[in-house]
C-alpha cells in the first residue's frame, strides 16, 4: 500500500452534515479532505429533497391550470411538456452543484471524487473516478455515506427494473399507468405529482393504511384527498409476483384480504424504505460496528465504536431528513470545540409535501398513548380557518396535544396550506416551553393560515377532562 496522505479531517460522503463539516473545518484552517463517490453535495440537491419538490411544484402548477375555471379564469387547450419539467429540475440541480463546488474551492477543502473504502483504522483507499487510487489517513474521520432505496424481495420485481425515486425524477414522459409500491412519504408525494401530470396511478401499500407511522386520522385524511384526485389506493395487499418490464408493461399479482387479483400497468415505482450504504466499505477494518440493519452504531455524541471516528446522518440511524443531518453537524462541531451537545431529546419536525402538505412536530396521539402521557387534544378543520375561504383550500385539519400537567404544547400536526411554516411557529413555542395560552392569546395577522392557531388553542379542553390519548 502506498504511503498515506495525511489530513487532520477526513470525511467520507458529501451529504448535508459532511459537506458543512468539511467547509467549516477548511475555513478554520484545518487540512481537510472529503471523498464523494457520485453526488456532489449528497442526495438532497441532486436526486432527493430539492429535485422532488421542484417537480412537485410543477405538478401543482399543472393542477391549478387544469382547475383554473374554479377561480373564474378561462384557459385554452393545456399541454404538458415533461421534457421541460425535467429541464427545469436539472437547471436547478446544476446551479446547486456549481454553488457547492465554489464552497469547496473557497474553503480550501480537497474534494476527491471516487469510491472510498477503509483498509485500516482511519485510513481510506480511494479508487478515483478518473482512474488511479489515493490512500488517505485522517486524524479525525467522519462517515457520511447515506442510504439507498430498498427493493423488496418480490419474485420478478428486481428483474422488472423498477423505478426508484431517482429514475422517477428524471423521466421525460408521463407514464400512462404508474404503480407505486409503498404508501410512505416518497411514494405519496410522487404518486400525486404523476397523477397531476396525467398518469393513472395505483398505490399498493402492504400495511393496513398509508402513512402507517402517523395517527390514523392523518392517514385517512391524506388517503381521502388522494383518492379524490383519482388515485387508486389499495392497502393490506401482499404482492406475490411481478412480470414484465417497467416502462413497457407490468403485471403485479396481489393477494388481498378478499382474493387474488392482477393489476396491469406500464411502469412501477418502488418506495418501500431505505438501506444504509455501509456494506463493502470496509468498516470492519476501521473497527466501526454496525447494527443488525447495517446502520453504524453511535452514541448520543455520534461517536462510533472506533476512536476518533464519527458517523453523520442517515447511515448513523439519524432520522432521514436533511435538516437532521445538519443538526448532526452542529452537534459534532460544537463538541469538537469543547461543547457537550447530544442527540438526546432533540425536537425533530418534518413535512410531507403532498398538496395539501402535512407537517408534524413533537408527540403524536399514538406516541402519547404508547408512552402513557396524559394529554388534551384539540382539533380544527382547515375550513374553519378564514384564510382558506379566500383560496378554496379547506381540506385537512390542525391538531394540537397539550400536557395535562403544565399546559405546555407537546405536539402539533397540520394538514393544510403552508403547514410547514405554521408548524415552525408552534415548534418555537414548544422549544420555549410556553404554556399554550400564550400562543392562544397572541395577536395573529388576519387573514393568514397561522391565524387558525388561535381558534385551535381556544378549544383545548380543561384539565379536568384530560384523557390518555388513544
Image: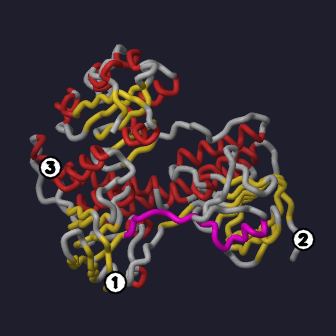
**Alpha-carbon distance for marks 1 and 2?**
48 Å
Give whichever of discs 1 and 2 has the lower sequence position.
2
399 vs 124: above or below: above
Q: Residues within 10 Å of mark 1 (few under 14, many from 20)?
A: some
Which numbered disc, 3 or 1, marks the residue that appears first in the sequence? 3
Q: Residue at x 81, y 61 (%)?
A: 122
Residue 67: image tag: 3
Element at label 1: strand
Q: Which residue is mark 1?
A: 245
> Is residue 274 a member of the stretch shown in magenta?
yes
Q: Which mark identifies residue 3?
A: 2
Distance (Cα) linking label 3 and label 2: 65 Å
- Residue 77 place in picture, x, y as percent: 12, 59
What x and y, as percent, mark residue 66? 16, 53
Sooner in the amino-acid sequence: mark 3 or mark 2:
2
Q: Quadrant of residue 201?
A: bottom left
Segment colored magenta: 270-286
Q: Are marks 1 and 2 in contact (CB under 8 Å)?
A: no
Residue 179 in the image, given as x and y percentages of width and height: 28, 70
Is there CB contact under 8 Å for labels 3 and 2?
no
Residue at x-position 61% and y-position 60%:
295
Quarter of the image that includes the C terminus:
top left
Tell me if I can see residue 94 in this picture: no
Please say if 188 is above or below 246. Answer: above
Specify whether 184 is left or right of 339. Answer: left
Residue visible at 34% across and 70% down? 172
- Asked if residue 41 can be seen in this view, the reply is yes
Residue 466 position in % (x across, y down)? 34, 25
Q: Secondary structure at mark 2?
A: loop
Residue 328 or residue 413, whichever sits in front? 413
Total of numbered circles in the picture? 3
Instruction: Answer above or below: position of 334 versus 289.
Output: above
Amino acid at each position: 500500500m502506498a504511503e498515506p496522505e495525511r489530513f487532520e479531517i477526513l470525511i467520507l460522503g458529501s451529504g448535508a452534515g459532511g459537506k458543512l463539516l468539511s467547509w467549516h473545518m477548511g475555513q478554520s484552517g484545518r487540512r481537510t479532505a472529503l471523498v464523494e463517490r457520485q453526488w456532489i453535495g449528497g442526495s438532497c440537491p441532486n436526486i432527493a429533497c430539492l429535485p422532488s419538490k421542484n417537480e412537485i411544484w410543477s405538478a401543482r402548477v399543472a393542477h391549478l391550470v387544469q382547475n383554473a375555471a374554479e377561480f373564474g379564469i378561462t384557459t385554452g387547450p393545456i399541454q404538458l411538456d415533461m421534457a421541460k419539467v425535467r429541464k427545469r429540475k436539472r437547471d436547478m440541480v446544476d446551479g446547486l452543484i456549481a454553488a457547492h463546488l465554489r464552497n469547496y474551492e473557497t474553503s480550501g477543502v480537497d474534494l476527491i471524487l471516487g469510491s472510498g473504502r477503509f483498509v485500516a483504522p482511519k485510513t481510506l483507499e480511494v479508487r478515483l473516478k478518473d482512474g488511479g487510487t489515493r490512500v488517505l489517513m485522517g486524524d479525525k474521520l467522519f462517515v457520511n455515506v447515506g442510504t439507498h432505496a430498498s427493493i423488496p424481495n418480490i419474485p420478478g420485481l428486481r428483474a422488472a427494473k423498477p423505478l426508484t425515486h431517482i429514475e422517477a425524477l428524471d423521466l421525460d414522459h408521463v407514464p400512462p399507468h404508474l404503480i407505486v409500491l409503498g404508501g410512505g412519504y416518497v411514494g405519496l408525494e410522487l404518486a400525486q405529482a404523476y397523477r397531476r401530470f396525467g398518469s393513472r396511478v395505483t398505490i399498493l401499500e402492504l400495511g393496513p393504511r398509508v402513512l402507517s407511522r402517523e395517527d390514523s386520522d392523518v392517514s385517512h385524511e391524506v388517503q381521502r384527498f388522494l383518492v379524490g384526485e383519482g388515485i387508486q389506493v389499495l392497502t393490506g395487499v401482499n404482492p406475490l409476483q411481478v412480470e414484465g418490464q417497467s416502462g413497457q408493461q407490468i403485471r403485479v399479482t396481489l393477494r388481498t384480504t378478499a382474493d387474488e387479483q392482477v393489476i396491469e400497468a406500464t411502469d412501477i415505482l418502488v418506495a418501500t424504505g431505505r438501506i444504509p450504504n455501509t456494506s463493502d466499505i470496509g468498516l470492519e477494518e476501521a473497527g466501526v460496528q454496525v447494527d443488525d440493519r447495517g446502520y453504524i452504531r453511535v452514541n448520543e455524541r455520534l461517536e462510533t465504536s472506533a476512536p476518533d471516528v464519527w458517523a453523520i446522518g442517515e447511515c448513523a440511524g439519524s432520522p432521514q431528513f436533511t435538516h437532521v443531518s445538519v443538526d448532526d453537524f452542529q452537534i459534532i462541531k460544537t463538541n469538537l470545540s469543547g461543547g457537550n451537545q447530544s442527540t438526546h431529546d432533540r425536537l425533530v419536525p418534518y413535512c410531507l409535501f403532498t398538496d395539501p402538505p402535512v407537517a408534524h412536530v413533537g408527540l403524536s396521539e399514538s406516541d402519547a398513548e404508547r408512552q402513557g402521557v396524559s394529554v388534551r387534544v384539540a382539533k380544527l378543520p382547515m375550513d374553519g380557518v378564514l384564510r382558506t375561504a379566500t383560496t378554496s383550500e379547506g381540506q385537512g385539519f390542525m391538531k394540537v396535544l397539550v400536557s395535562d400537567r403544565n399546559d405546555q404544547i407537546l405536539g402539533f400536526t397540520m394538514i393544510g396550506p403552508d403547514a410547514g411554516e405554521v408548524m415552525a411557529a408552534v415548534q418555537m413555542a414548544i422549544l420555549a416551553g410556553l404554556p399554550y395560552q400564550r400562543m392562544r392569546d397572541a395577536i395573529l395577522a388576519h387573514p393568514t393560515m397561522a391565524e387558525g392557531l388561535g381558534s385551535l388553542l381556544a378549544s383545548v379542553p380543561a384539565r379536568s377532562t384530560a384523557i390518555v390519548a388513544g
